Amino acid sequence: MTNTIKTPAYVTDEKILDRDLGALRKIADEAACKLLYSPKACALSPVLEKVAGRVDGFSCSSLFELRLIDRVCGGETPLHLVSPLLKEETLGEIGGRLDYLTFNSLTQWELFGDKVPAATRAGIRINPQLSFIRDPRYDPCRRNSKLGVPISKLAEAVEAEPARLRGISGLHFHNNCDATDFASLLATARHIQDVIPNLLESLDWINMGGGYLFNLAEDTSDFFHAVEVFRDTFGLDVFIEPGAALARRAGSIVATVHDLFESDGIQVAVLDTTVNHMAEVFEFQFEPDVLGHVDGGAHPYVLAGCTCRAGDVFGEYAFDAPLAVGSRITFPNMGAYTMSNAHRFNGVGLPTIYTRRADGGLEMIREDTFDDFARTAGVAGNAVA
Ligand SMILES: Cc1ncc(COP(=O)(O)O)c(C=O)c1O
């Protein structure tokens, strides 16, 4: 079936999405917590349309994401906004549609608190000051963090002036990435309970963020204990807002080999995709999974992207059968942070987007064109004959 695909392609598999969404729904229901989806992981229509109606809302990061979700869901789904940037015009344009608005800082709360619509629940993002991520580029609790009010500062502020948080009904935290067990979540919940118990008593809700790969966790008991800390001890509504856990396994990139040649003793296969399309591969310098790769396979290759960047390379892979010009290469588990980070460096178009329906049928959703490239370059007009 992959041969009918125009490459480079990004394919959403509805069956996998259904499976992973169902598993997340089940665990959220068992824990009696509310499940939001973070569209920053993947905001493509096949994903949003499937997710809509099966989650308790969307946790957005920007005005565009909010408007996109409203367009897909017809204005029917609960919307949350959490972002370090809040512009007055965003509040003016969509504030009335926000069910939950989380302020990133006390200064933003002081600036905009009186503009929060009456029906919108306001919260504060806290920095729990517990780091679990080694790479500071992705650690919300890094030194000099811009993400949330440090919990010790919040405790001091509330003690010095309890009225400062009047109007705030909830808290938000997010301090992990791709975790497959929940020990750090439970440690964070207990830490928050220890530092600001009185504040928790006065609130209605807490959002525990994303950062956990629920479907890969062998033991979820710490997740349930973390929810219990807030729900049972303080009577809070508890939210989670995963992105990758829902979207990652449902998406793949499919590419075609366009050239093969020897370089320093190994065959290089040049593909029609690039790290432009899988930006995290370049950012984290990891070798993505490739279907058909066999450790020690008889036919080794360097799989390379098609741009002029020397490091536009996926890594060394080996196959049982040799590749040829025209061979297809599939990168699975590319559903999260792939298309939302993809760009057109070198003028290479974005992957064509497909969805594989549950009955196996393949539908093209969008093809990137020269006109799209020209429009983003600010170049108007018709193609030159
Ligand atoms: C505030 C917030 N919530 C949720 C998420 C989603 O995280 P993940 O995709 O790791 O589940 C992120 C990711 O960066 C985030 O910053």
Image: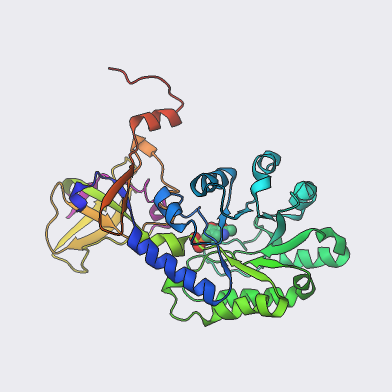
Q: Residue furthest top?
A: 385
Residue 213 seen: no
What is the image's colouring? rainbow
Question: If the image is split into quadrants, where does the C terminus sit?
Answer: top left
Q: In this view, does 102 lie to the left or right of 196?
A: left
| Image quadrant assignment for residue 330 | bottom left
Residue 280, image x and y in percent? 42, 54
Residue 155, percent from left and from top: 79, 68
Is 300 colored magenta in this rendering? no
Q: Quadrant of residue 90?
A: top right
Residue drawn where x is 23% and y is 54% of the image: 329
* Picture quadrant of residue 191: bottom right
Q: Quadrant of ligand 1?
A: bottom right
Does 269 sit above or below residue 237?
above
Instruction: Provide residue 221's location: percent of width, then percent of height.
Output: 52, 82
Position of residue 250 measured from the top left corner of the image (x, y, whole percent)? 36, 60
Q: Nearer the viewer, residue 52 or 1?
A: 52
In the picture, measured across the screen, residue 98 lies left or right of residue 245, that is: right
Residue sitting nearer the eye, 246 or 159: 246
Q: Give the range drawn in magenta.
A: 262-285
Q: Is residue 107 above or below residue 154?
A: above
Q: Is residue 310 left or right of residue 132?
A: left
The image shows a total of numbered marks equal to 0
Can residue 30 be seen here? The reply is yes
